[in-house]
Amino acid sequence: MIRVCVPWPAQVLRTVAADVPAITPEVRAIWADMVDTMEAMPGYGLAAVQIGVPLRLAVVDCSEQRGQAVLMANPEVLHASGQMREHDEASPNLPGVSAVISRPRAVTVRFLNAEGRMEDRDFVHLWATSAQHQIDHLAGKMYFDHLSAVKRSMLITKSQKWLRKERGRG
């Protein structure tokens, strides 16, 4: 089921999400909805907080054909490369805008996988960017928090103008 992404500045987007103690049918249902929602955007990843669920759940799929989503509970970065990569990032929670963000090119992430086992996985390039973006969401951070205060303010203002314009069309 496709879920609605909560609009910025919803409090859930600034709250540290709660750990997931076990993979349950409810967690699997949330993951399924998250994948459906991510595919509908289309996007490369989604954190549960983006749909108003304050749990440390994330999905990432940067494959060309799609259908390769990595389902993660309680993801954490264990290691990040010193080499940085820039990518234009956006969020359905703050529509109509994006910003170039610099993040480590490669990361090793530890998470509870769909089978309920701890897994360490290496992500590179776009996969690494998306995994880090989702992990930031679960810590109550948005991609624009990586910008200066002035750029962040300009981005939020631009999104608000974009939303008013879109509402005027409807």
Image: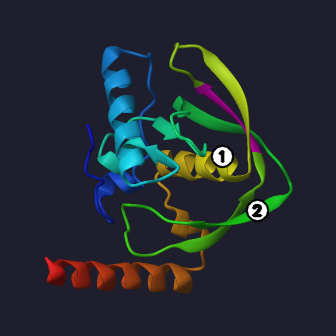
Give neighbour class at mark 2: few <14, some 14-19, many 20+ (Cα, 10 Å).
Answer: some
Give neighbour class at mark 1: few <14, some 14-19, many 20+ (Cα, 10 Å).
Answer: many
On screen, 57 above or below 16? above
The quarter of the image holding the N terminus is: top left
At 53% across and 30% down in the image, what residue appears?
72
Coloring basis for residues? rainbow
Amino acid type of disc 2? Arg
Q: Which mark is residue 94?
A: none
Residue 33 image position (x, y, % from top left): 32, 35
Label 1: which residue? 127
Q: Secondary structure at mark 2?
A: strand
- Residue 123 included in the magenta stretch of the image: no
Q: Secondary structure at mark 1?
A: helix
Residue 160 image position (x, y, % from top left): 31, 80
Of all residues shown, which one is farthest toward the front? 65
Residue 127 image position (x, y, % from top left): 66, 46
> For this view, does 153 lie left or right of residue 161?
right
Q: Quadrant of residue 11?
A: bottom left
On screen, 35 above or below 169? above
Q: CA distance from mark 2 to mark 1?
A: 12 Å
Label 2: which residue? 85
Look at the image and give the residue range highlighted in magenta.
107-111
Which tag, 2 or 1, sits closer to the chain's start?
2
Residue 92 image position (x, y, % from top left): 38, 61
Of all residues shown, which one is farthest toward the right? 82
At 32% across and 40% down in the image, what residue appears?
53
Q: Main secondary structure of the magenta part?
A: strand
State the residue in front, 61 or 150: 61
The quarter of the image holding the C terminus is: bottom left
On screen, 21 above or below 99? above
At 29% across and 46% down in the image, what residue appears?
52
On screen, 21 above or below 164? above
